[in-house]
Image (spheres, helix red, strand yellow):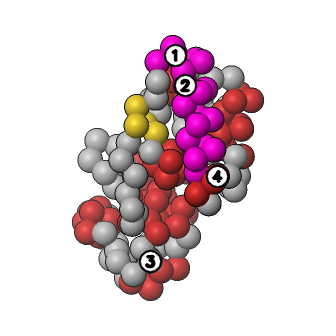
């Protein structure tokens, strides 16, 4: 999976920021990666994190070990672990999270169950991340438009 979203276009060529697909993999394998740690990696290392699979249990474990080793090499400190959600909201196509509905309503948009079901898990992940307080929320509106939900 190396698809980037249009709302990420201003940084994906250089990978200066962590793209959503890598952020999803990090949440899946239980690693918190700071932007400062990401920026200590080479472009090839960042690209590998984009390209490495992280779907099956074996891939998730391998991704976890790879990123742990990489962060330790680059920073001298182990990566911060995150709890892994047993049933992540982005994989639940049956329930639109309230935080997403609230954020969408701020834009005058109502997301239907059908809208939510029609999104890919990565699109749902992006909306969840972009709707959180303290996040750069300008991209939420761009994502809603990109996903044809306006």
Label drawn at residue 93:
3
- Closer to the camera: disc 4 or disc 3? 4
The residue under the point 54% across, 21% down is 72
Q: Is residue 112 left or right of residue 14?
A: left
On the image, numbered disc 2 is attached to which residue?
71
Tell me: residue 123, above or below residue 113: above
- Closer to the camera: disc 1 or disc 4? 4
* C-alpha span from label 1 to label 3: 38 Å
* C-alpha span from label 2 to label 3: 33 Å
- Assign the N terminus to one quadrant of the image: bottom right
* C-alpha span from label 4 to label 3: 23 Å
Residue in the foreground of this view, choosing between 10 and 48: 48
- Closer to the camera: disc 1 or disc 3? 1
Label drawn at residue 75:
1
Q: Secondary structure at mark 4?
A: helix
In the rendered image, which quarter is residue 131 located in?
A: bottom left
Tell me: residue 60, above or below residue 144: above
Magenta residues (range): 60-77
Residues marked 2 and 3 touching at CB (< 8 Å): no
The residue under the point 28% across, 41% down is 134
Mark closer to the chain start, 4 or 3: 4
- Taking the image as drawn, is residue 19 in sight? no
Q: Is residue 4 left or right of residue 79?
A: right
In the rendered image, which quarter is residue 40 located in?
A: top right
Q: Give the prevailing secondary structure in the magenta stretch.
A: helix
- Closer to the camera: disc 2 or disc 3? 2
Label drawn at residue 59:
4
* C-alpha span from label 1 to label 4: 24 Å
């Amino acid at each position: 999976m190396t698809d980037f979203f249009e709302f990420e276009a201003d940084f994906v060529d250089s990978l200066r920021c962590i793209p959503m697909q890598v952020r999803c993999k990090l949440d899946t394998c239980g690693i918190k990666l700071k932007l400062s740690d990401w920026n200590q990696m080479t472009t090839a290392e960042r690209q590998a994190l984009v390209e490495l699979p992280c779907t099956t249990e074996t891939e998730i474990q391998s991704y976890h070990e790879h990123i742990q080793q990489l962060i330790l090499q680059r920073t001298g400190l182990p990566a911060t672990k995150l709890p892994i959600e047993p049933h992540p909201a982005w994989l639940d196509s049956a329930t639109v999270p309230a935080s997403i509905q609230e954020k969408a309503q701020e834009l005058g948009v109502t997301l239907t169950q059908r809208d939510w079901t029609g999104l890919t898990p990565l699109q749902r992940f992006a909306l969840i991340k972009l709707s959180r307080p303290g996040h750069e929320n300008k991209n939420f509106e761009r994502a809603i438009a990109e996903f044809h939900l306006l």
